[in-house]
Amino acid sequence: MVTALDSDTELRRRAWDAAASVVDPEIPVLTIADLGVLRDVALNGTEIEISITPTYSGCPAMNMIALEIELALERAGFHRPKVRTVLSPAWTTDWMSEEGRRKLRAYGIAPPQASSSRRALFGEQAVACPQCGSGETELLSEFGSTSCKALWRCKACREPFDYFKCH
């Protein structure tokens, strides 16, 4: 026998899976689930509501992400889904999945280190090169191709690379 609770759980799982398939428009190898931006799925009667938290306030990708979530849910059979932006608690790189960190490294972006590290807070961290793995790297610019990345260079292989900043 299928109960209403079982049915609700299945609907939430289907909605989560649909929303979790949405990729980040700035780093297309990551899904919003990999990033930890996808926070919650709520079922209110017949309405589905997805909660997302931006990587930082004013992130220009959030409007596109919300639209892509709505489209993914509609394709999955949900009618007029709602996307809610939640600012508190603020997003942290600690929410990024291990799979997301692996995908970043494979894509050539050094993944963030634990934001709770004192060294990360004061910019003293050693960042391993995603190309060759060397720890002999140097910061070129705090500002990379997007607001969440910094530009680094490996002293061993001489390749520049992006580093996903901790926050």
Image (cartoon, rainbow, N blue to C red):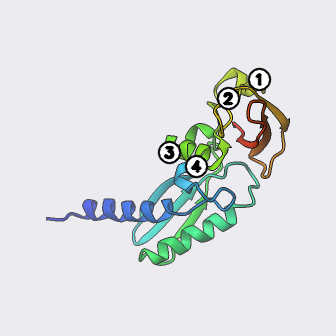
Q: Looking at the image, is mark 4 or mark 3 nearer the viewer? A: 3
Q: Which mark is residue 99?
A: 3
The alpha-carbon separation of the residues under discs 1 and 4 comes to 24 Å
Crowding at label 2, few (<14), some or many (≥20) Cα neighbours within 10 Å?
Answer: some
Q: Residue at x 68, y 35 (%)?
A: 129
The alpha-carbon separation of the residues under discs 3 and 1 comes to 25 Å
Q: Looking at the image, is mark 4 or mark 2 nearer the viewer? A: 2
Residue position for label 2? 134
Q: Looking at the image, is mark 1 or mark 2 nearer the viewer? A: 2
| Among numbered discs 1 and 4, the one appearing first in the sequence | 4
- Residue 96 visible to the viewer: no
Residue position for label 1? 124
| Among numbered discs 4 and 3, the one appearing first in the sequence | 4
Residue position for label 4? 35
| Among numbered discs 1 and 2, the one appearing first in the sequence | 1
**Badge 1 element:** loop
Q: Looking at the picture, how far across and down is residue 23, in whole percent?
A: 58, 61
Crowding at label 3, few (<14), some or many (≥20) Cα neighbours within 10 Å?
Answer: few
Q: Amino acid at mark 3?
A: Glu
